[in-house]
């Protein structure tokens, strides 16, 4: 790791562990593009490489012009939402026609600096990866084959599209409390992991859990997604580290962990609006509007919490022993909401506060580091006159140096 001090900011060389089953890292240097975004190149193994620092957005039906503006303002990773999995096949919710229309709107010089992920799932979407394959068993191998075919079809049909760098697991709960989707079955876990492993040699994989599904303030674990939220017990859609067990089962399988701070009645919102104290709920003066300083502090605390790690009592579920879960800074991405989010159910953290928290950095066994960056929901709801992604990108580049990455 290299450390560069400039003013009040610390620049670091981010260390990425080996992601393949061999665990043999290779080293390369990433330099900045004229736009300030780091260049993106393939690793020697053929696996795609992420930008050294990342500002990502979910499409959610955004128009080509909206995506183009986000890229112009600093977006360097696009999460195409959503595809689904059913009957051992990819259901093409993201079509080549849509991707083509977006890419045609982008400046040609921006295409080489972008990474693309296919996001799977979303809220109130059934986990049809399991139990939908008729007489044949649902198979991670078959889903991986179908995804590879989908990726090749997309590259063939969309001029200039380099292919997906990876997949993004976004399975969540549903409004119907009786639905089996509100509990991760062992079969769903197995298929998610097996598909990820089958794709590992050529693709990256990210997890994007709501905060309660990967909660570094909670030592408990359960596969159910129907727990009461801390600040609003009548809201019964919180999780208890349901994604943490997937990561603990195979941490090398996942290149990113993108925790959604904007989850409904999340702990981040509890800290922001109720000062993290249950006795403040319902009291005069609460919920309060969090200040910029509050936002920066809470985002920083959540970054540090994930990197420092926490003990989780898995108690042998899926063969996973109780252990300390630690996420390397290079894998940590904070999920935030833009213009649609706000008091008090879905917490809002400004782009400026997020970028300032990133500049603060975290402390790990490697010393002072930046986390990987941010992902926001969603590009469609960005404000053209006061761009959320522009705020994050501007704040991050104000303290960003050249980064060396081991991949």
Image: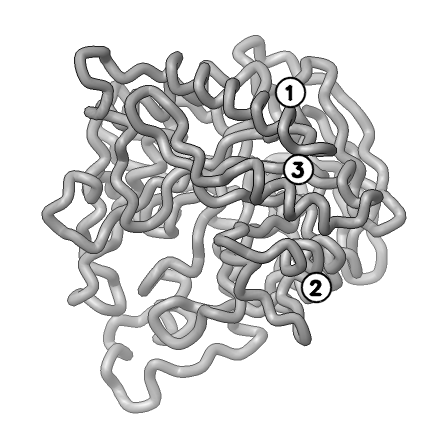
Q: Is residue 225 visible?
A: yes
Taking the image as shown, residue 237 lies to the left or right of residue 107, namely left
Q: Which residue is mark 1?
A: 47
Q: Say whether marks 1 and 3 touch (CB < 8 Å).
A: no
* Of the pair 69 and 303, the residue shown nearer to us: 69
> SS for tag 1?
loop
Q: Is residue 381 above or below residue 246?
A: below
Taking the image as shown, residue 188 lies to the left or right of residue 352, namely left
Whichever of callouts 2 and 3 sits on the residue coming sooner in the sequence is: 3
Q: Tag 3: Cα neighbours inside 10 Å, few (<14), some, or many (≥20)? A: many
How far apart are labels 2 and 1 at the CA level?
29 Å
Residue at 62% across, 66% down: 388
Q: Which residue is mark 3?
A: 115
> SS for tag 2?
helix
> SS for tag 3?
strand
Residue 390, labelled with which disc? 2
Q: Is residue 273 above or below residue 197?
A: below
Residue most toward the top?
22
Q: Tag 2: Cα neighbours inside 10 Å, few (<14), some, or many (≥20)? A: many
Q: Is residue 219 visible?
A: no
Rendered image quadrant of residue 172: top left
Rendered image quadrant of residue 310: top left
Residue at 78% across, 33% down: 404
* Of the pair 245 and 390, the residue shown nearer to us: 390
């Amino acid at each position: 790791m290299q450390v560069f001090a400039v003013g009040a900011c610390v620049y670091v060389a981010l260390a990425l562990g080996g992601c393949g089953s061999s665990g043999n890292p290779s080293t390369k240097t990433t330099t900045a593009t004229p736009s300030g975004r780091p260049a993106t190149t393939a690793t020697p193994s053929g696996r795609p490489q992420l930008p050294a620092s990342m500002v990502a957005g979910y499409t959610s039906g955004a128009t080509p012009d909206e995506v183009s503006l986000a890229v112009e303002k600093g977006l360097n990773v696009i999460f195409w939402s959503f595809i689904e999995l059913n009957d051992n096949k990819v259901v093409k919710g993201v079509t080549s026609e849509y991707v083509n229309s977006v890419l045609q709107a982008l400046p040609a010089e921006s295409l080489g600096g972008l990474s693309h992920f296919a996001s799977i799932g979303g809220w109130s979407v059934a986990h049809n990866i399991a139990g939908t394959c008729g007489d044949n068993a649902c198979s991670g191998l078959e889903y991986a084959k179908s995804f590879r075919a989908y990726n090749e079809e997309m590259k063939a049909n969309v001029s200039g599209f380099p292919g997906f760098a990876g997949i993004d697991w976004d399975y969540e709960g549903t409004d119907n409390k009786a639905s089996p989707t509100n509990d991760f079955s062992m079969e769903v876990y197995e298929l998610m992991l097996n598909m990820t492993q089958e794709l590992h040699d050529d693709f990256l994989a990210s997890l994007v859990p709501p905060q309660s599904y990967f909660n570094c303030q909670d030592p408990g674990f359960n596969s159910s997604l129907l727990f009461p939220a801390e600040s609003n017990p009548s809201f019964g859609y919180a999780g208890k580290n349901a994604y943490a067990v997937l990561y603990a089962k195979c941490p090398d399988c996942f290149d990113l962990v993108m925790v959604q701070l904007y989850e409904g009645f999340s702990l981040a919102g509890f800290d922001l609006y109720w000062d993290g104290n249950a006795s403040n709920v319902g009291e005069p003066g609460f919920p309060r509007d969090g200040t910029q300083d509050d936002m920066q502090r809470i985002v920083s605390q959540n970054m540090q919490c994930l990197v420092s790690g926490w003990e989780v009592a898995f108690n042998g579920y899926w063969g996973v022993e109780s252990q300390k879960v630690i996420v390397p800074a290079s894998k940590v991405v904070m999920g935030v909401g833009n213009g649609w989010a706000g008091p008090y159910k879905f917490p809002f953290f400004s782009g400026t506060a997020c970028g300032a928290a990133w500049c603060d950095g975290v402390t790990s066994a490697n010393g002072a580091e930046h986390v990987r960056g941010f992902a926001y929901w969603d590009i469609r709801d960005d404000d053209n006159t006061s761009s959320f992604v522009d705020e994050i990108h501007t704040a991050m580049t104000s303290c960003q140096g050249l980064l060396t990455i081991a991949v």
